[in-house]
């Protein structure tokens, strides 16, 4: 973190502790919103063994009813999650934890939302294709060094690669799940 509190965009080598961090956060989230039933998945780059990533755990939450979730979502503030609304993806409820030292993103979708499948296919495709995951990690490290800590530039510079892999991953996921 800089002295002025600006978020630093840093991509680091894979940390084998990330899956454990996911488990801790998942338990915390479930504790805050009980008795609501929720499925939690570790997604994003920290969920892919060996992949370089920003050290921020991405969690996808699948709820059976968004209205029921919204009635208890305020409880996540106790666990230091800050609600950000849909944040650019219709049907999603997005939360951040950690401010400029972001440690977690929570993406909540209702069962059946196509973004659930997209995220899980992307993760599983990278796990099954470590050569592509390695290429992605190299791209992310390069972008982090050149983006001047601007998250929009960082994301834009990897967007074409991500969209291409995402398309391949969804086709691959359909074949695997048939």
Image: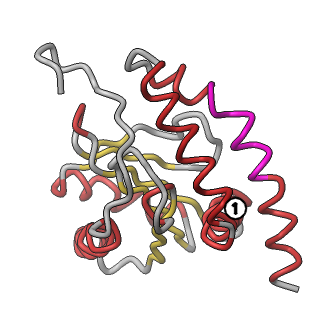
| Direction from residue 99 to residue 89 in the image, left or right | right
Mark 1 crowdedness (10 Å alpha carbons): few <14, some 14-19, many ≥20:
some
Verify whether residue 114 appears in magenta. no
Residue range corresponding to the magenta coloring: 157-166
Nearer to the camera, 84 or 42: 42
The image quadrant that residue 133 belongs to is bottom right
Verify whether residue 165 appears in magenta. yes
| Direction from residue 174 to residue 88 in the image, left or right | left
Nearer to the camera, 125 or 114: 125
- What residue sits right under mark 1 in the picture? 113
Question: Picture coordinates of residue 51 (x, y %)?
Answer: 49, 57
The image quadrant that residue 111 belongs to is bottom right
Which residue is located at x 56 percent, y 68 percent? Answer: 65
Indicate the colouring scheme: secondary structure
Question: Picture coordinates of residue 105 (x, y %)?
Answer: 39, 50
Height in image: 8 above or below 67?
A: above
Residue sticking out furthest to the left: 3
Q: Is the magenta stretch mostly helix, strand or loop?
A: helix
Question: Picture coordinates of residue 106 (x, y %)?
Answer: 41, 54
Which quarter of the rendering shows the N terminus? top left
Which residue is located at x 46 percent, y 39 percent? Answer: 85
Height in image: 68 above or below 39?
A: above
Which quarter of the rendering shows the C terminus? bottom right
Height in image: 101 above or below 109?
A: above
Which residue is located at x 66 percent, y 60 percent? Answer: 131
Which residue is located at x 35 percent, y 72 percent? Answer: 19
| Direction from residue 87 to residue 174 in the image, left or right | right
Q: How many marks?
A: 1
């Amino acid at each position: 973190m800089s002295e002025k509190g600006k978020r630093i965009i840093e991509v680091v080598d894979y940390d084998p502790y990330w899956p454990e961090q996911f488990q801790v956060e998942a338990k915390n989230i479930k504790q805050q919103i009980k008795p609501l039933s929720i499925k939690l998945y570790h997604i994003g780059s920290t969920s892919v063994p060996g992949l370089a990533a920003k050290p921020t755990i991405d969690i996808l939450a699948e709820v059976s009813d968004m209205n029921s979730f919204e009635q208890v979502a305020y409880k996540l503030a106790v666990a230091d999650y800050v609600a950000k609304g849909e944040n650019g993806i219709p049907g999603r409820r997005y939360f951040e934890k950690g401010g400029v030292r972001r440690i977690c993103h929570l993406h909540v979708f209702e069962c059946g939302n196509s973004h659930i499948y997209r995220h899980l296919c992307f993760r599983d495709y990278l796990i099954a294709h470590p050569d592509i995951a390695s290429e992605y990690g190299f791209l992310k490290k390069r972008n982090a060094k050149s983006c001047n800590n601007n998250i929009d530039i960082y994301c834009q510079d990897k967007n074409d690669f991500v969209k291409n892999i995402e398309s391949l991953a969804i086709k691959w996921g359909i074949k695997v799940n048939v």
